Amino acid sequence: MAEPTIEDYYLEERSFPPPPEFAETALVRDRSLYDQAEKDYQAFWADQAAALTWTKPWDTVLEWDLPFAKWFVGGQLNVSYNCLDRHVEAGRGDRVAYHWEGEPGDSRTLTYADLLDQVQRFANVLKGLGVTKGDTVAIYMPMVPELPVAMLACARIGAAHSVVFGGFSSDALRGRINDASCKVLVTADGGWRRGAPVGLKGNADEAIAGAPTIEHVVVVRRIESEPPMTEGRDHWWHELMQGADPDCPAEPMDSEQLLYLLYTSGTTAKPKGIMHTTGGYLTQVAFTHKYVFDLHAETDIYWCAADIGWVTGHSYIVYGPLANGATSVMYEGTPDFPDKDRWWSIIERYGVTILYCAPTAIRTFMKWGTQYPEAHDLGSLRVLGSVGEPINPEAWIWYHENIGGGHCPVVDTWWQTETGAIMISPLPGVTATKPGSATFPLPGISAEVVDDAGTKVTKGGGYLTLTRPWPSMLRGIYGDPERYKETYWSRFPDRYFAGDGAKVDDEGYLWLLGRVDDVMNVSGHRVSTTEVESALVDHATVAEAAVVGAKDETTGQAIIAFVTLRTGNEPSDAHGQVLRAHVATRIGPIARPKTIIFTDDLPKTRSGKIMRRLLRDVAEGRDLGDTTTLADAGVVDEIKRRAATAPTEE
Ligand code: WTA
């Protein structure tokens, strides 16, 4: 038999069926959606699309010319109409769309009627600046309500938006503006971060200096500053809005019209402008937001703690929740300002019922300790979500117990910028969850794990592939159809593959194993970083771990572990020995780390993913490659210092 593509070591046996009191009122309590989708997935998605308001019905559900998909062909609808007008027309204009809280503690409440008013006015502002259907508008903003307003205003008039995360540099912004030839940039004077105002307009100006297509810049005043304003080009948001016409009809859009571009920051290559279109995208984000989080829009208070600059924010702060008429919390700042209990205070004060966040946040909270959540009443919570990285089983349990009080289903949702919406996840009223597993593909989605040869794996590890088109799939990479084919559709015939490893257990559950580029080869065994990390986090003293393979003369690669301890635990050589032994008992001697480096922080991307590539450079003593996507460059220097003195086991 061939060697396994990725080996399967970590055994997690805990299982959590939906709590009966939860299942009783859940939107989905049985397998009927799965059965319906299994019979005819196109008819299933057509049913979901019918929950939206279309100004013209589609002729064909799906045109699939691999790898190019068109969904709901011939249909027309407007995304901002579906997110705003139809709720207001149905008499729900007074429902809160966003409870917004600024980092300094200021707050704003926007109802659906307020949001519709703002969006119409800003849509007219954009028109007045010459933006027309088919143009692309760049948006570079902190987490303020004007950000979703600007996105929806683009959608209202048929312009695409390209949101660039507010923490990115002027270079990153310039490259993205130029790639899409944006005419208008919407930005702010700055935002609040850890108690201090951080300017943004200066970066925007630097970017525009090398972006000749930009004709106008609209600036939201957030930090009461007076940045230089270029006459004729730069305009204050509040001044333009004052004179704006409050009526702007929603333009009907073709289902396949470009809704937005969102660039994935590849760590080495040029960023890819991921294209998302209108009808299929809105269908799948609305469907998944409703059913994965068991949304009861009249009563739930939903909070996705991501930044809108990432796809999670696009799909699950803006389009999914608004399409469903949900009430959301939106928060501007960091979790540790003014203290490490900010999130729990927000949950208590707004009565948040659904929380959606990333494992990196959960592991940070584990490191800080339970006294912060314990100081608040989190009893309103009923569903917890996770996204962005594999969640280590022990972090899952910590989240379940300390945040969810042991009674909230945890939905671990796997998806990507490219997939547009959640693909693999439990349905909380139906699926028995297992800590660390994203469980099964959602109804209408088909995923399979395959080996190197592309043969389906029914038990064990391999490559995660998607075998059918889905409504919110990327339509391509902006301006580069060849790169689209090559990147996602060339590794296995007729399958989408975007770089993740996964394993299937004997009950068919899917366990994500991280990026396949990170898989280590130790004495011929293909060991996933995720499994060793989970074994380390399984130890009661560990909050977070990152594992990499470094070249080794005897074993090919040796496992080097970077470990952050929970507050109150001291690093020592003896403790390193304890952790090595723990990994060996938990998953086997082959996975025993050769070196353990204790560190207070790990290098992460700005969206919170551990950058193992940099850690590999540190472990192999190389000069560091590109560090521009790093959230905090100081972390690496500290790690290098610690690595130089870390004891190594022979
Ligand atoms: C990883 C974020 C394991 C994965 C929505 C994927 C996950 C990449 C999970 C996409 C999860 C996301 N379990 N891994 N639940 N969710 N990932 O484009 O490697 O920022 O390919 O989209 O994050 O990241 P992106």
Image (cartoon, helix red, strand yellow):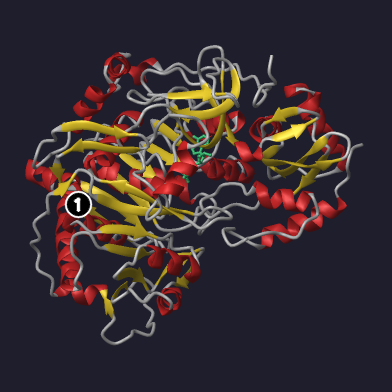
Say if 173 sits above or below 239 in the image: above
In the rendered image, the residue lying farthest to the right is 650
The answer to whether the residue bearing label 1 lies less than 8 angstroms from the nearest atom of ligand 1 is: no
| 504 lies left or right of 548 | left
| Numbered-mark total | 1
Where residue 377 sits, quadrant-wise, is top left
Q: Secondary structure at mark 1?
A: strand
Where is residue 190? Give x, y as percent.
41, 71
Image location of residue 328, percent across then percent down: 30, 45
Seen from the viewer's position, the closer of residues 71 and 236 is 71
Check the picture and name the quadrant holding the C terminus. top right
The quarter holding residue 436 reads top right
Location of the N terminus by quadrant is: top right
Q: In this orientation, which residue lies closer to the viewer: 238 or 485?
A: 485
248 in relation to 443, above or below: below
Badge 1 is on which residue?
A: 111
Judge from the rendering whether residue 638 lies leftward or rightward of residue 495; answer left or right: right
Give the residue drawn at x 57%, y 17%.
14
Image spot of residue 599 (x, y percent) = 73, 50
Residue located 55% across and 45% down the image? 372
Q: Position of residue 159 (x, y in %)?
A: 23, 59
Q: Amino acid at mark 1?
A: Thr
Q: Is residue 436 visible?
A: no
Write the residue at 38% across / 85% down: 228
Mark 1 crowdedness (10 Å alpha carbons): few <14, some 14-19, many ≥20: many
Placement of 330 over or under 584, stated as above or below: below
Residue 454 visible from this viewpoint: yes
